[in-house]
Image (cartoon, rainbow, N blue to C red):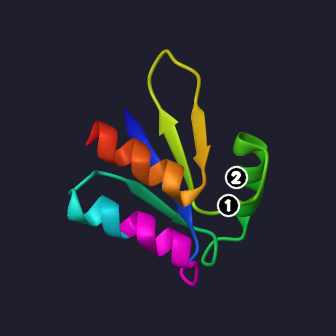
Amino acid sequence: MKLTLYHMGHCPYCKRVIKVIQSRHIGVTYKDLDVHDKLRKELMAGGGKVQVPCLLMTEKGKRDQWLYESQDIIHFLKQHY
């Protein structure tokens, strides 16, 4: 499964998620909306809203899953990694 985290540098909820990712050494691609404005459109088109943090889970042969809410993301990560 490929994981991509949409985040913003000043977001305290994003920082919480990133802390868990780093402490568990989870391989994640980061997409910073502060750096690339086009990512807002990408997030809206895929997940349906521009809200961070958002974890995109991509698995070959399966539908992409977009997970919002930092506590939900952290819970998912702790269950699976």
The percent position of residue 54, horizontal first and vertical second, equals: 58, 54
Q: Secondary structure at mark 2?
A: helix
Q: Which mark is residue 43?
A: 2
Percent of width and height locating residue 29: 41, 55
Residue depicted at 73% across the width and 61% down the height: 40
Q: Amino acid at mark 2?
A: Leu
Instruction: Please report the residue visible at 72 percent of the width from the left and 70 percent of the height from the top.
Output: 37
Q: Amino acid at mark 1?
A: Leu
Q: Are marks 2 and 1 in contact (CB under 8 Å)?
A: yes
Q: Nearer the viewer, mark 2 or mark 1?
A: 2
Q: Based on the displayed image, in which of its 4 quarters is residue 50 positioned?
A: bottom right
Number of marks present in the image shown? 2
Residue positioned 58% across, 30% down in the render:
64
Give the side of residue 25 with respect to residue 41, left or right.
Answer: left
Q: Quadrant of the C terminus?
A: top left
* Residue linked to disc 1: 39
Q: Quadrant of residue 76?
A: top left
Can you tell which quarter of the image residue 22 is in? Answer: bottom left
Q: Eyeballing the image, is 32 above or below 9?
A: above
Q: Which of 42/3 is in front?
A: 3
In which quadrant will I find the N terminus?
top left
Q: Which residues are magenta?
A: 9-18
